[in-house]
Image: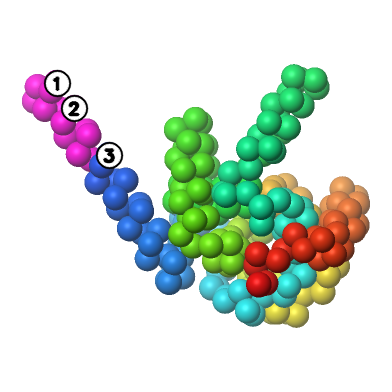
Amino acid sequence: MTLGKALWWGVKFLAGLFVTVHLYALILFFAPVPGTANMAGRVMQGTPLYHTWTPIEEISPHLIRAVIAAEDTRFCSHSGVDMDAIQEALDERETKGRLRGASTLTQQTAKNVFFWNGGGFIRKAGEAWMAVFIDGFWGKRRVMEVYLNVAEWGDGLYGAEAAAYGRFGKPASELTAFEAARLAAVLPSPNKWRANPAGPYVRQRTGTIQARMNVVQRDGLDACVFD
């Protein structure tokens, strides 16, 4: 095969992949996410998988406010990618010499559904593009619903329902504000920290998140999900 033909087939493959991913995203506006690369990786490692798709109406509002408070207080105001948070992270790198994460809940959803852990710049660029796409096409409420159904809470627990039963023995609809904050406190490192039993860091972070949840509700930072 000549170099020109190889390049042509490469372009066709990438174009087909681009179309396929976007068609899949359109389908997921209506259909539950069947699984993710992260879930498949856990299964291949021999970890039992617990996952039950749960409509957002059957998930405690406390958990919605908790993940916004913990991960993305500007969830309702950005378009999938928070440029202000990225600039703040870059400024912090300049002053403190370390780069903190600036991924939005929408980016985390895009990564979980369409991509995989790792991958460097190429994956991050694709993640950002898909975050903007699903933010515009799905809308905030659907993005939150998908996020809460594919997020990992450790020990093979995926989604709010599995996490609620696995950590507190109850459905996601019955989570209290404290329990929701405790679940959000382990994000985004659910295999490093545990919600129950919780260590000192998670207990401290739980209190911080509960305080922020009150601000989220008071200031309507969750309005795009509940309106």
Which residue position is annotated with label 2?
7
Which residue position is annotated with label 3?
14
Work out how far the residue at label 1 is from the one at label 2, CA to CA, in angstroms. 6 Å
Work out how far the residue at label 3 is from the one at label 2, CA to CA, in angstroms. 11 Å
- Helix, strand or loop at label 3? It is helix
How packed mark 2 is, by other alpha carbons closer than 10 Å (few <14, some 14-19, many 20 or more), is few
The residue that appears at 67% across and 72% down in the rendered structure is 226
The residue that appears at 85% across and 59% down in the rendered structure is 215
Q: Nearer the viewer, residue 99 or 169?
A: 99
Up the image or down, 187 lies above or below 216; here it is: above
Quadrant (top left, top right, bottom left, bottom right) of the N terminus: top left
> Is residue 167 something one can see in this rendering?
no
Q: Amino acid at mark 2?
A: Leu
Up the image or down, 124 lies above or below 105; here it is: above
Q: From the top left corner, tell me how far across and down residue 186 is, in percent.
A: 75, 53
Q: Amino acid at mark 1?
A: Leu
Q: Nearer the viewer, residue 82 or 53?
A: 82
- Helix, strand or loop at label 2? It is helix
Which residue position is annotated with label 1?
3
* 11 in the magenta segment: yes
Quadrant (top left, top right, bottom left, bottom right) of the C terminus: bottom right
Q: From the top left corner, tell me how far across and down residue 136 is, in percent.
A: 49, 56
Q: From the top left corner, tell me how far across and down residue 155 is, in percent.
A: 64, 59
- Helix, strand or loop at label 1? It is helix
First to last magenta residue range: 1-13
Quick check: 152 left or right of 214? left
The residue that appears at 63% across and 79% down in the rendered structure is 57
Tag 1 near tag 2, CB within 8 Å = yes
Q: Amino acid at mark 3?
A: Leu
